[in-house]
Structures are given as C-alpha cells and as structure tokens.
C-alpha cells in the first residue's frame, strides 16, 4: 500500500458492506482502502483487492484496537473512517481528500445527499454552499488529519455507541472558527434507516446511546442540549462568510432557507420513490482546488 498515496480509507465493514462500489478499478485514485471487518465469516472480503483486518465490536472500539495494533496508517496524511452503508463514487472520495488538503482542515465529513436517511439536518447537503465550518462532524463518516486522529484515538472507547464524539472531536480543536466542517461539494448517500443491528447490539448490552451522548459531552464540559451550529461557510461563489458577523450571518440564513425550501419541495417525491438510493449526478464542482487554497489563506481559523 501507499505507493506515494497520501490518503487512506478505512471502512468498518460487515458482510453487506457497500465499499466495492466506491472504487473504479479502471482509473487511478488518490487513496488506498483497508477493510476493518467486524463480521464472523473468515472468508468474507478475503482475496479481494483490499487489505482486510478482523476486529469485532462496535465501530470505534474495533477501529481503536486496529489503529493501536497497526502502524501502516501513519504513512498517510488523511484518514477517512466511513460506515459501510454509504453509497458514493471514487471521484467523490478523491475530492473529499483534495478539499481537506486545500483548506488544511483537521476534521471533515462529506454531506449527505437529499436521498439519504438522516438524523441531523445540518449534515444534509447545502446547494448554496461549498463548505460549512461547524462545531460537529457525524461519527458516520469523519475524515481526520493524521495528527488529529492521533490526538482523538484515546476517545474512541469513551462509550459503546460513539454518540457524543461528534461534538467532542471539534471541541478538542479549541474555541472559535475551527478547522472542521461539512463539505457540501462532496456527497454520500446513507442507504439504511437510522438505527439497525448495531443499535440492537447496544440495547442487548444495556447501552442507551442518548444517555451515553449526554454523559460524554458533560465529561468535556459541553452542553448536550445545544443544537449543532455552523460557524462559517464558503459560498459556491467563493465568498467566505464569518457567521460571528451580523451581515454574514443574515446572508447565510437567507441562503440556507433556499436550501430548506428546495429540500421540503423535493423530499416527498424522494421518499415515495428513491429514499436510500444514490441520487442523480452530484452538483458540478463550483470551486477549483487552487481557488480553495487561496480562500483558505484568508480564513481566520482559531
């Protein structure tokens, strides 16, 4: 692996993982992929094109065990840790890493497209923004800089469910506008309803994710009642919005309302015909990587 690649995907995979569909073997890509398998079939994902490692247990417990045992991931600059029920394409993953590098972010996630099952509306794609800098990133698909993953690794076993880590990790980056956000130019589709077998296992172990979220957030001095927030954004035009400024905040709210109105208009049809299935071709890229680097130099990160 590596061969000069700077980016790594580690998918926490069961028997029905969708990761084979993320790769186009006919074209080069900027990342390697490793399967962290939590199932019990010794032959599943063996003999395929990707390295497969066995680690049972909940997502972040298994990942913590693997990352502490193995060292190969330290050869990469960026590590994405997606769930296995996401649908996306190789180009989207390449672009995820490219934007993270251009903006020099420590923690990011792709947006969920409007065909996705979702829990928090903030992670749904904004069609008016390219990037939103937020105080949370969902545990479903976080992408870390290597240095920040090293720092966060000890938190992976803070509880069984992982709930609350979405807020703890950005908190570790400090106050103010952080190098953390949701990339609206990159999308994945969450194909399964929220919950599922993983949460059945948690209940069997006497774990309530909602209680775990409150507990871990309190441990870090965070208000579990506060809604997730956007702290800044880059419009698809390239304009940076600092949401601590009244004018920028008003402009952002107006643009976001356009997204909300469009989503409410489209969602009933999606739910009737194609919920959980990958939607049409994603929106055209609005900003090139060089332009994003230029914008990043002017952003007042904390």
Image (cartoon, grey):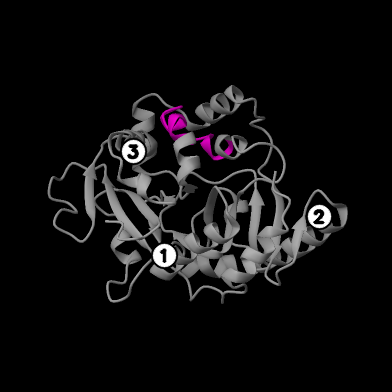
Answer whether residue 114 is visible to the viewer in this image. no
Q: Mark 2 or mark 3, which is nearer the start of the sequence?
A: 3
Front residue (pair 286, 21): 286
User: Mark 1 or mark 3: which is in front?
Assistant: 3
User: Mark 3 or mark 2: which is in front?
Assistant: 3
Q: Above or below — where is 164 with respect to 43?
A: above
Element class at badge 2: helix
Q: Mark 2 or mark 1, which is nearer the start of the sequence?
A: 1
Element class at badge 3: helix
Q: What residue range appears in magenta?
A: 152-167
Q: CA distance from mark 1 to mark 3?
A: 24 Å
Residue under numbered circle 2: 249
Task: Using the rendered view, name the quadrant where residue 299 is placed.
Answer: bottom right
Residue under numbered circle 1: 88
- CB under 8 Å between discs 1 and 2: no
Q: Above or below — where is 91 with respect to 125?
A: below
User: Does residue 51 appear left or right of residue 255 in this picture?
Assistant: left
User: Does residue 288 appear left or right of residue 212 in this picture?
Assistant: right
Element class at badge 1: loop
Q: Which quarter of the figure is the C terminus placed in?
A: top right
Task: Identify which residue is drawn at 26% across, 56% down.
Answer: 1
Does the magenta run of residues contain 141?
Answer: no
Percent x, y of residue 34: 29, 52
Front residue (pair 232, 252): 232
Residue under numbered circle 3: 67
Percent x, y of residue 51: 22, 52
Q: Mark 3 or mark 1, which is nearer the start of the sequence?
A: 3
- CB under 8 Å between discs 1 and 3: no
Answer whether residue 133 is visible to the viewer in this image. yes
User: Does residue 128 appear left or right of residue 158 in this picture?
Assistant: right
Task: Using the rendered view, name the quadrant where residue 265 is placed.
Answer: bottom right
Q: CA distance from mark 3 to mark 2?
A: 40 Å
């Amino acid at each position: 692996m590596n061969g000069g690649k700077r980016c790594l995907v580690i998918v926490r995979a069961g028997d029905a993982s969708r990761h084979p569909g993320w790769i186009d073997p006919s074209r080069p890509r900027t990342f390697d992929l490793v399967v962290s398998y939590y199932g019990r079939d010794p032959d599943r994902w063996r003999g395929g094109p990707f390295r497969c490692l066995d680690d049972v247990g909940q997502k972040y417990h298994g990942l913590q065990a693997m990352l502490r045992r193995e060292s190969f991931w330290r050869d990469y600059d960026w590590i994405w840790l997606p769930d296995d029920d996401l649908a996306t394409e190789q180009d989207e993953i390449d672009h995820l890493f490219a934007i993270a590098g251009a903006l020099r972010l420590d923690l990011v996630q792709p947006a969920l497209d409007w065909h996705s099952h979702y829990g928090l509306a903030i992670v749904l794609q904004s069609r008016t923004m390219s990037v939103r800098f937020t105080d949370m990133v969902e545990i479903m698909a976080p992408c870390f800089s290597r240095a920040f993953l090293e720092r966060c690794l000890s938190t992976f076993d803070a509880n069984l469910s992982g709930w609350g880590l979405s807020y703890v990790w950005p908190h570790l980056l400090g106050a103010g506008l952080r190098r953390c956000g949701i990339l609206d130019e990159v999308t994945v589709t969450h194909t399964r309803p929220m919950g599922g077998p993983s949460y059945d296992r948690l209940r069997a172990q006497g774990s309530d994710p909602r209680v775990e979220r409150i507990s871990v957030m309190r441990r870090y001095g965070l208000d579990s009642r506060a809604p997730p927030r956007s702290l800044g954004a880059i419009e698809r035009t390239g304009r940076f919005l600092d949401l601590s400024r009244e004018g920028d905040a008003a402009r952002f709210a107006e643009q976001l309302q356009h997204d909300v109105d469009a989503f409410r208009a489209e969602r009933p049809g999606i739910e009737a015909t194609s919920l959980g299935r990958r939607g049409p071709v994603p929106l055209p890229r609005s900003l090139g990587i060089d332009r994003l680097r230029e914008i990043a130099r002017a952003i007042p990160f904390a």
